[in-house]
């Protein structure tokens, strides 16, 4: 019988075998599916003991060597082997869908899919389907657990104690990674060889925050470059009713394995009722670093928009009563005597915003509870409908409306999600009554109840409940201390942005001296691949005087401007204090820069070194360029061939001054204007820790007459 089965399996193999006479080491035997342009191939086979295996090839070279798939389950036999293929089918799919807001208007979703249907050879004959999708920019696969036949409803529950998805690498790649923290993604990225990840992960366990760092694991997205210069990024898409995935590192074996975030309260990783599908496990594959940013794989692996028209949310720039708390100029609570959220202060910000083409105002510290927000017993502390007496919420909202500035609500939950869930309805009803369309949420601290973690299944479900409840009130969510971005914004486009990164705030108070100059040259290629980042750029008072003597932002002023283009978000803060902007000439770039895009392109990039991105604003003919570097000064070129042929534009170039330097002279800048067209190539002179921001706005006849053309290259 065994021998018979063996031959049947071999028969299948022969049918789908794509090998030919000249066998190379990269040829594998099994079922394969290739991407639409045949660039990327995923293969699947069963070992003789029925263990499911897959591999991935790029241009016929292995990028993931034969790796295992499967699960360990509570109270039943593991689903790791003993399986047979009962069916396999391959389909193609192509569509172009529209983003309601985003980095680009249209997204091509074109893939070939192979579904392998597996069943246990013996025993309960449990069924497991694996869906593989091959795109030209990467791959995704997910597991589908099917219902058990002839079993009552009560036996349809599965408890996952381990997911055994393996990713076997083909070399000791250069990696950009953060530790596999169960509570926070707010870490600096490490740049090491894969084989060096282990040691550093242990060292980083002494984190700044009270978080739960797993030894020897990394969080996703984790991005790599092979010796041949191929770029890979590992992540997940559509994280729904499941635990977040970290990746356990085997440094010697050059292999990673899924390690799901757990719960000390329940003792399991994931509990589901059959049937269900897991999130997609994804690998973005790009020849250039910029291909990773241009790839829309993560979004394509999510379901289409379920909310319909979300035009009630307008992408916007915003200011806020925020940075002053991080600088200790003001406080969230009232007892300190320097409460920031006052009606007067809010109106001053509204006046400033209205003058500067900024249409949003975030107010933190407006509601009661902040006196006890960092305490141990944080349950019931925050009230999401009651303002402090010196803050007239209704009046601030009214005044904002008069001036064209929308208030963005703030709900800090202090990681007590049950308290928040109890108040969702009254809190969102209040917002709806006032016409407030967006809320920034926050989850600072250890999760209550104890034993749950920010990235476990229980919290994944909380974050989703908040999102879907908010959607019923036409409210958009910008979550801080969130679950990672996995492309959910496609399905629920009220998921406008999130933190989940070491953002600007660390520059104000972090004891390690803040984000290093290379930080922002890494995050677009790692965290940014998941989705929009609420990074909050725009600090002009870079040395943070007179508020801080130990910290500064490790940047030049021009680099702060460039971040509006480099880091994508439909809500971009101009985070500094009004008095630090004043009438600064560089403020013009913040006034002009778009926040919603028809197109985005990466002109040039090397992860951790530099990146240049251009974006065309939706509904106008304006383009914006952002280019940033790490701690090294650089001379880059930007060919403006993306501009409309025959059209002339005014390029306003905001660049580092000749003597600019992120530490020694961060505020030295120059603004130059030239007439340019699609033949122009601009020299980007980036200082150490610096950047360049350029607005490219169609020129009027007057401007063509009066402004010099950009010098032609010699
Ligand atoms: C952490 C958030 O990241 C920050 O932006 C906010 O100001 C504080 N929590 C308070 O909610
Ligand atoms: Ca934070």
Image (cartoon, rainbow, N blue to C red):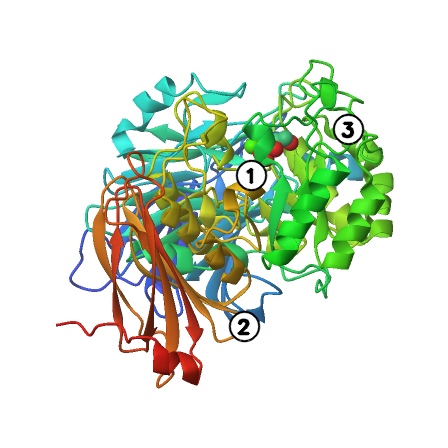
Could you say where residue 20 lies in the image, as x and y percent from the top left?
A: 22, 64
Which residue lies most toward the top here?
Answer: 376
Mark 3 to mark 1 CA distance (whole Å): 44 Å
Q: Can residue 408 be seen in this view?
A: yes
Q: In which quarter of the image is the N terminus?
A: top left
Mark carried by residue 362: none
Q: Which of marks 3 and 1 is in front?
A: 3
Q: Are marks 3 and 1 in contact (CB under 8 Å)?
A: no
The image shows residue 360 at horizontal and vertical percentages of 66, 52
Rendered image quadrant of residue 643: bottom left
The residue that mark 2 highlights is 95
Which residue is depicted at the point 35% across and 33% down? Answer: 516
Q: Which residue is labeled 3 in the image?
A: 418
Q: Quadrant of residue 556?
A: top left
**Residue 542 image offset from top left, x and y in percent:** 42, 37
Q: Disc 1 designates what residue?
A: 122
Observer-nearest residue: 431 or 326? 326
Residue situated in front as seen by the camera: 366 or 269: 366
Mark nearer the N terminus (3 vs 2): 2
Q: Which residue is drawn at 19% across and 74% down?
A: 712
What is the count of numbered marks? 3
The residue lying toward the viewer, choosing from 593 and 576, is: 576
């Amino acid at each position: 019988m065994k021998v018979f089965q063996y031959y049947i399996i071999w028969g299948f193999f022969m049918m789908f075998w794509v090998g030919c006479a000249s066998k190379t080491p990269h040829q594998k035997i099994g079922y394969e599916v290739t991407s639409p342009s045949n660039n990327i191939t995923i293969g699947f086979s069963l070992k003789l003991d029925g263990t499911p295996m897959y591999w991935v090839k790029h241009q016929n070279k292995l990028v993931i060597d034969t790796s295992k798939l499967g699960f360990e389950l509570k109270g039943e036999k593991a689903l790791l082997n003993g399986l047979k293929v009962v069916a396999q089918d391959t389909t193609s799919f192509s569509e172009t869908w529209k983003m309601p807001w985003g980095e680009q208007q249209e997204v091509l979703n074109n893939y070939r899919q192979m579904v392998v249907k597996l069943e246990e050879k013996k025993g309960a004959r449990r069924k497991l389907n694996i869906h593989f999708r091959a795109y030209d920019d990467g791959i995704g696969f997910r597991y589908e657990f099917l219902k058990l036949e002839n079993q009552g409803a009560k036996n349809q529950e599965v408890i996952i104690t381990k997911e055994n998805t393996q990713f076997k690498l083909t070399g000791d790649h250069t990696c950009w990674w953060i530790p596999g923290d169960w509570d926070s993604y707010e870490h600096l990225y490490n740049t090491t060889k894969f084989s060096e990840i282990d040691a550093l992960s242990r060292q980083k366990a002494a984190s700044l925050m009270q978080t739960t760092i797993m030894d020897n694991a990394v969080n996703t997205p984790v991005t790599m470059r092979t010796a041949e210069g191929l770029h890979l990024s590992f992540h997940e898409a559509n994280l729904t009713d499941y635990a977040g995935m970290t990746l356990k590192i085997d440094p010697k074996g050059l292999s990673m394995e899924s390690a799901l975030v757990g719960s000390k309260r329940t003792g399991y990783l994931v509990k589901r009722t059959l049937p269900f599908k897991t999130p997609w496990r994804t690998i973005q594959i790009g020849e250039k670093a910029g291909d990773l940013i241009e790839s829309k794989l993560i979004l394509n692996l999510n379901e289409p928009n379920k909310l319909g028209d979300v035009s009630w949310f307008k992408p916007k720039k915003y200011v806020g009563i925020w940075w002053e708390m991080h600088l200790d100029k003001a406080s969230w609570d009232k007892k300190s005597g320097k409460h920031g959220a006052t009606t007067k202060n809010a109106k001053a910000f509204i006046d400033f915003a209205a003058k500067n083409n900024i249409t949003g105002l975030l107010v933190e510290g407006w509601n009661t509870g902040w006196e006890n927000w960092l305490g141990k017993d944080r349950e019931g502390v925050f009230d999401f409908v009651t303002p402090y007496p010196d803050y007239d919420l209704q009046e601030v909202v009214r005044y904002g409306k008069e001036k064209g500035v929308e208030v963005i609500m703030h709900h800090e939950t202090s990681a007590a999600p049950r308290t928040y869930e109890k108040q969702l309805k009254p809190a969102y009803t209040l917002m709806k009554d006032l016409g407030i369309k967006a809320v920034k949420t926050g989850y600072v601290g250890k999760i209550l109840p104890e034993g749950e973690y920010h990235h476990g299944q229980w919290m994944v479900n909380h974050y989703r409940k908040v999102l879907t409840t908010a959607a019923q009130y036409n409210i958009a969510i910008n979550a801080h201390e969130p679950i990672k971005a996995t492309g959910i914004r496609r399905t629920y486009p009220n998921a406008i942005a999130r933190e989940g990164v070491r953002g600007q705030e660390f520059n104000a108070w972090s004891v390690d001296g803040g984000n290093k100059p290379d930080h922002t040259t890494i995050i677009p290629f790692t965290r940014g691949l998941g989705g929009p980042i609420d990074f909050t750029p725009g600090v002009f008072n870079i040395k943070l005087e007179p508020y801080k003597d130990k910290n500064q932002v490790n940047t030049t002023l021009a680099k702060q401007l460039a971040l509006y283009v480099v880091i994508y978000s439909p809500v971009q803060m101009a985070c500094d204090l009004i008095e630090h902007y004043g009438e600064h000439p560089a403020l013009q770039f913040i006034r002009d820069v778009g926040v919603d895009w028809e197109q985005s392109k990466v002109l040039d990039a090397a992860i951790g070194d530099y990146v240049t991105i251009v974006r065309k604003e939706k509904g106008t003919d304006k383009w914006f360029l952002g280019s940033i570097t790490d701690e090294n000064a650089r001379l880059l070129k930007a060919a403006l061939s993306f501009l409309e042929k025959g059209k002339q534009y005014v390029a306003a170039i905001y660049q580092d001054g000749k003597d600019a330097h992120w530490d020694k002279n961060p505020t030295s800048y120059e603004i130059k204007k030239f007439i340019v067209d699609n033949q122009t190539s601009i020299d980007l002179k980036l200082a150490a820790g610096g950047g360049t921001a350029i607005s490219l706005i169609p020129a009027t006849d007057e401007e063509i007459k009066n402004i010099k053309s950009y010098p032609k290259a010699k």
